[in-house]
Each structure stands twice: as C-alpha cells, then as structure tokens.
Image (cartoon, rainbow, N blue to C red):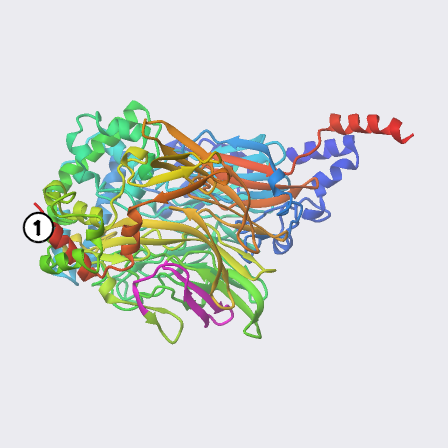
Amino acid sequence: MRLGSCYLRFLAAGLLLLDVCYGPAFGQGADRGLDSVTLLKPPADSWPTYHGTYSGQHHSRLVQITPANVYRMTLAWAFETGQTAEIKSTPILFRGILYATTPDNVWALDARSANVVWHYTYPPNQGLHIGHRGVAVYKDSVYFTTPDAHLISLDARDGKVKWNVVIADVKKGYWTTMAPLVVRDHIIVGTSGDFDNLPGMLKSFDPETGDTQWTFYSTLPRQAPEAFSGGATGGNMWITGTYDPQLNLVYVGTGNPTPVLAAQDRPGDNPWTCSILALSPDTGKLAWGFQPSPHDTHDWDAVEVPVLVDGNFKGVPRKMLLQASRNGYFFVLDRGTGKSLLTTTFAAVNWSAGVDKNGRPIPNPAKDPARDGRLVAPDEGGATNYRSPSFDAKTRLFIVSARDAYGIYFSKPEHGEYGWAGADYGLFGKGMLEAIDYQTGKVRWTHDLGGGGSAGVLTTDSGLTFTGDSAGNVLALRTIDGTTVWHSRIGHVGNSPITYELDGRQYLLVASGGTLYAWALPEMPRAVKQGSRSQANPRSR
Amino acid sequence: MITHSMRIKVTVWNSQSFVLSLCLAVLGSSQCIAGQGVPGLRVEVRRKSLRNFVAQASADRDPRGQDQASQAQAPQSPPSPQVQAGQTLFAAQCAFCHGRDAAGGETGPDLTSSEIVEKDVGGNEIGPVVRTGRSDRGMPQFNLTDADLGAIVAFIHDEKAKAESKPGRRRNVQPEDLQTGNADEGKHYFNGAGGCSKCHSPTGDLAGVANRLRGLALLQSMLYPKPHKSDSADSPATVSVTLLTGQTVTGRLAYQDEFVIGLTDSSGWYRSWFKGGVKFKVVNPLEAHSEQLGKYTDETMHNMLAYLQTLR
C-alpha cells in the first residue's frame, strides 16, 4: 500500500521523488529495499548495519564536520522515547529512516525531523530486559530480537510483523539483545544468558521465512557425550560480528564460561568461551578460534567488536583482526588463520602470568576467585566493554574507551557450580579514551574520561573522534592528538555515536538516557538567505 | 513467507490462543513456549527443568552438587499469584543487576541480605528506592504501578525467606571467610610499605573501626572507601580555586569534569567556575587508595584486614 502511494506521489511530483524512491543508494529498477550489494559499499546517506560497514571500524568517510568547525554544531533535533530504559542501540539509517530500539521497542524515525513513522511494541514478557543493541535491515524487513529470545521480522514500511520465531528457550534462561548481522540471505543472531549453565548459540535464519539455517554451539551441555569444553558451558555471542566478503568469514566474539566464577569443576581452557571465532556464514562451520581469555574466571566476555583492518603489518601486507578485549589485552590477529601477530595490555592487568607462544594470556590460578577474596584488575566491568571502538586508517589508531579498574572476587564450594557461583565487587575505576597504534600496541595518546566512561567511539575522515565521558559530556576530539574541540553535557552517552549525510548536511547522532540527539552545522534559515540576497543585490548593481 | 492477513493477526499476539497458533504454524509445537500466559504453569515448568539440569549436571561429578540438587528438590509450597507476578517482573527489570533470585548479580547487591529489605514492611522501604533510584550507585528509577511494585516486593521477601532457609547457597561473603591474614604483618605494612600511617592512625580516625565495620564492608572500605553520596558533604576531596582577581576560594570538591570545577564553600554554598578562567588545585586523599590498589598483593591485603580487625 505504501508502495502504491509512493508511485502516485511519484507521478504527481515528477522527477524530484525519483531520488526518494530510487535514490542512488538503493539501486535501479524494482524496489527491493536494502540489498546485499549496498551492504558491501554503504553510501554516505546511510548507516545500514550495526557497525556501519562489515569491517566493524565504526568510522565514517564524511568530512563536512571538521576539527575547525565542529564547535559551531547545533542541535538539529532531539527525540525522546519517553522511557526510563537507556538507549544502548546503534541506530540504523536506511532510506532517510532511522531505526532505534530499547527492549521491546522499535522506532522508525524520519531522520530529517524525528517524526515517528511507526513504533512497534513487543508484548510484556519474562525475558531479561538488560538492554538492546539495535536492529538489522535487509530488503524491506527490519529484524528485531526480543528479551524472551525471539526473532521478529517487521515490515520496514509500517512496522507490521511478518513473522516471529524462537531463537532460544527463555525458560532455560536465555535472552537476546543483539542487533542481527545480515550476510547475503543469512540473518545471524546470538544468544545471552549468564545465570544458568547453558551452551552459547549463534543461529542463522532465512530472511524470508524465519526458518533456521544453521546453529553453531560455542559449548555443549556439560553432560553431552561430545562436550568439548572441559565441563564449561556458556560462551554466548551477544554482540554483532563482522564479515570479510573476500574470505567469506564471519567473525564473532564469545562470552564467559559458566559457572562464571567457580573454576574448580571446569578445568582446561574451556573452548570456545571468551574467544574470537571465524565461521562460515553459509554453514556455521568453525574455520578457526583464538582465546583471549583461556579458562576465564572473571566474567570477561571476549565479545568486543572484532575490527577488520587491511594493511601492512611490520612490512608485510596482511588481512588483520583487532580486538581490545574486556580482560585488558589488545590483540592483532591474522584473520585468515587466526594466528597472533601482537598481544599487549592496554589497561591495568594483574591476573595473568604472561603470554604463551600463541599470543594468549596465561591465567594465573592465584587470581581465581577464592573464599577470602582476590584483588583483580580489571574488575568485572572490564578494561573495556561492548560499546564500539573505532579505527581510523589515516592515523592507524584504534581508539577505545578503556578503564583501569580493580575488583575483589570470591568463590567457595558453598556457592555451588551453577550460574554465577561466586560474588565480586568493583572497587575503583578510572576511565580514559586510548588511541592505540596497532602496529606496536603502544598508546599514542590518552584522554581522561573521569570515573567511568564506556561510551562507544566514532571517527571520521575529517580527523574527528566522538565519544562520551563519565560526567555526561558528549565529546569531539582531534583524532591526531586527543585534544577536545567540542562538547555538550547531554548526560551519559549510552550508545556508540554514528554519523551520516542527508541533503548535503552531515549529522552526528548520539543517545543519552531515553533520548536521541542529532547535531549538525548550523544552516542559514531560508528567510535570512533571501533577505541577505535582496539586500546585497542593490549594492552589486 | 507469511501472508498479509497473517501479519495483521500477529499484531494481536498477546492473545494466548494466537500464541499457540503462531507456534504451530511457524515454529512447530515443540518450540512453542509452554504455558505462555499461564504464570503458574510457567513457573512450575521452569523450576522443574532447573532442578533436573542441576541434578543431571552434578550428580556424577561432585557430592556437593548432589547436596545442592537435593536441597533444590525439597518440597516447596507453590508461590502466591502475587509472588509469581513479581517473579516475572523481577526477571525482566531487576535480575541483571540483582540476580534472578535477588541474591546479587553482575553489579547489584544481594537483596536477600539487604538491610533495606530486612526493615521493609509491605514496600515501605523498598518502594522509595525502586521509584527514585540511586543514581549515585548506578540504580535507575523505575516507573511501576502500585500493583507491580507490590508484586516485586512480595517476590523479594519470598526469595529472602527461601535464601535464609538454605544458607549455604547464598552468594555472599562471611566475615569468617576473610580470616586468612596475619595482623602483625598487617601492622608492619600499615606503618611501612603501605604508607597508611601517613593519613590514618589506629588511635585516631581508625580507633574502633572494627566495631563500626565488619567483614566484607571493612575490606571494601579499607581498599577504597566510597563516599556514600555523591554530594560534597561526604567527599574527602578539597579544592582551592584562585580567581582572576587573585582571590582564593577553598572548599570541598563538589563537581569536576573536563570543563567545570565546583565546590561547597565554608558557608555551605555551591560555587562553580569554568576551568579555563581560574587556577585550581585538588587535594584528594582517596588517590592514595586508588594508587595502592596496584601495589597490594592478596597477602598484604589480607594482612591489612587482619590488622584493622584488631582495632576495636
């Protein structure tokens, strides 16, 4: 129906609408919506996937807003969800429509005006409402995960439900928050769940029917005969992965093992928990795995974005994968093989006994949670967390919101071996933005963020870095040296900022609390433009 | 692909009959959520599967696990409808921080041993905390109806009663767990390498500290004493601000970010300045604690606690 009215308006309004309906971003001919070719090379007037591009670099080529003019930015609009739930999602921009989420909610917003095109509300449910990271868009559908671990396909035009399928069983303790990853005709979604000894799952669904195409298990139930994780379960995949179309591999991080803090009954490395995995998007088959935290006992998920970078590493051309992991280590891997190229720390770390020959940190058993407590750095929140870091190719800097943080970890046999199986308490944390030269792992600059930080990071080709501090300022820094060039205290930045260009104007989009803020350079009002022209003209004559 | 008529049906899918038909049509009945919309059945199913899982997982591995499983299998009276409703709400809104059984989770404390819950009667203590939040401790405020709040309160009290009947299963830390240090070594560290005596005295500010704080609370306070409120009255940091006129204003540090510095002056007024327009010097005694976190070993930490426990 919407398509029909679009055609009518097209006839009435003439060629102007051609761009709206069939703009250069979305191909010629039939109105297929967002296609897989566009996903490979997103145009400037879109942010069509969670990471913006498949590489996970969370970087934009836009250059209108620069270090020299960013101080002039003004609020274009703000949109209040009216909810107490924090917006943690990275919005998607497709065809001038923004798709933003909180648990149980999807809003489709006019990116020019913040007008609500539609609002979908999922019914009350018993799933864990911890947060929501966003949707995926493919063709004319919006794919949305729910707290009770369903995947829903919504019509991108009007938010009507096309289908609703179960990803995992909420009664067993699963929930979902993840923005799905679209690779051709695969909608790839992972699960969450820390309170039960459950296997981690990544599933691929058919975009048209919702049928399950494959399921990858990072661990198996403890009692399963073919279990391979030394008695551990867990390893949930709850952050959107990245994709290399040439290698045809999807990269995804896995979460902590369960039982979480009790280590005695799950000896060994506990693969594939706290791991970076390369999988075939077509079959879910594992190509390789690398464990940032073998035998984790501190809840340090390795789900942080696996960022894909191509370039020379120590003089050799490489296809690389970079991750700043929650455990305080920064890794550079060859993403064809999973072999380590560099392992270094980027924050306070006291839990390891060095690095093994394969580039994996060696856990020090003396820092396992114990009856009388162990003082451990980082704390459970980690040296960084799930919000996106950014990679700036010009400066070769990997920029991440980091923390030096300490916690105390306890576990005793009476805590059992189910779910959390222990207790831990954060003591102190100091937040800073770190710019890491990935060739050396050295930190080129740091920018103090106060007690916490943890907002996502966006860089642009104009040399700007956007993030948030712990006091609630959204910040623009010069990428080259971390100097502040703009700020606004909108409250704690809860997501990873994005940017896009519409009608020749670049926007910065940031969430704080339940509100989305769109910033842009000021535009001269039409009346002022006309006024100045009519005043100027007589003089020129 | 589902037809357009079916799409319209999906928009009313909180109807239980439709849930069933959707499950049958799209998912196959085996994947349907059994008992969706029937809270009593749902709770029973969950409990049973959890018990089976624990029993299966641990029966052939560890005698302690068997104890747990048999504890979990002890007969329980079915929870009231209000508690069941509270369980659903708690799972959705509160469980990530406080654990699904209210005994503590990723960031939130164990509510079953909370003083507020202990004092609470019918929500008179819990309610205000839930509705206004504790922003200084990371707890958001929740907009809940009286009925929903009442259900959550009932659930918390129910979990507290359950936890107290099974003391071994609580994820908590008892003072007796922490008695592995050597008080003499701790005293030596206090006066020597730890540098504690530069600011503290066992006969001054720390006299009787072991009577005021016990166990985990004493350990946490020793490692990094967190101000109870984010306001200046509780902050030990002070700041001295020199204005362009040359005048100096001193007070307790009340606010600081990259751009603004604020203090509470001696007469109780809050004052702030843009950092670019003044000179200032912050003195924060807590910095010694944060720096010390990187210097402690677990042994020196436990020795220090043992020493502080002698200060009665």
Chain under label 1?
B
What residue is pinned by disc 1?
A: B310
| Residue A191 visible in rendering | yes
Residue found at the very far top of the displayed protein: B146
Q: Is residue A303 magenta?
A: no
Which residue corresponds to the image point at 64% horizontal and 38% vertical from the top-left? Answer: A521
Which residue corresponds to the image point at 62% horizontal and 46% vertical from the top-left? Answer: A46
The image quadrant where one finds the C terminus of chain A is top right
Q: Is residue A253 above or below residue A485?
A: below
| Residue A412 visible in rendering | no
Percent from the top left, x then y, of residue B128? 27, 27
The image quadrant where one finds the N terminus of chain A is top right
| Closer-to-camera residue (A231/A79) | A79
What segment is highlighted magenta in the picture?
A327-353
Q: Quadrant of residue B5?
A: top right
Which type of secondary structure does the marked residue at label 1 adopt?
loop
